[in-house]
Amino acid sequence: ASARPLASASCFDSVQINTRDAVVNLDTLLQAHSAASIAVSNILSVASDLYLWTMTEFKYLELADRYCGTSSIMPQKKNSWSLSWVRG
């Protein structure tokens, strides 16, 4: 008893040999999770580099005041809290 006549009568292109493949597609979930993990890793790496470049020792970059806070001990010092928050 072949399932091919039933597949063609039901307007399906072919018969799925493994029924789990027909119901569950974990590859898409795995690829989405991998892409999200890589994106977050890249964002954290960029934020870490930007944080380093905005430190007073380097001063390659300067963030706008709306992305910075002041130190409680030294009010004249700018702390880039937004990059610290992204870094975790």
Image (cartoon, rainbow, N blue to C red):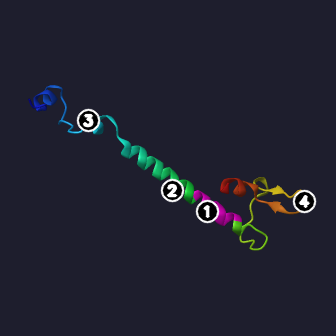
Q: Quadrant of residue 43?
A: bottom right
Marks 3 and 1, Cα distance to the nearest angstrom? 44 Å
The residue nearer to you, when weighing 57 against 67, is 57
Find disc 4 in the rendering and name its residue: 75
Q: Which residues are magenta?
A: 43-51
Inter-mark Cα distance, 1 to 2? 12 Å
Q: Residue at x 12, y 32 (%)?
A: 4
Mark 3 element type:
helix
Disc number for residue 38: 2
- What residue does disc 1 label? 46
Residue at horizontal 26 percent and vertical 35 percent from the top: 19
Q: Position of residue 84 (x, y in %)?
A: 72, 57
Q: Is residue 8 magenta?
A: no
Q: CA distance from mark 1 to mark 4?
A: 27 Å
Q: Earlier in the sequence, mark 2 or mark 3?
A: 3
CA gap, disc 2 and disc 3: 31 Å
Name the residue carrying label 3.
19
How many numbered discs, if any? 4
**Tag in front: 4 or 3:** 3
Q: Quadrant of the N terminus?
A: top left
Left or right: where 68 falls relative to 46 = right
Q: Residue at x 29, y 37 (%)?
A: 20
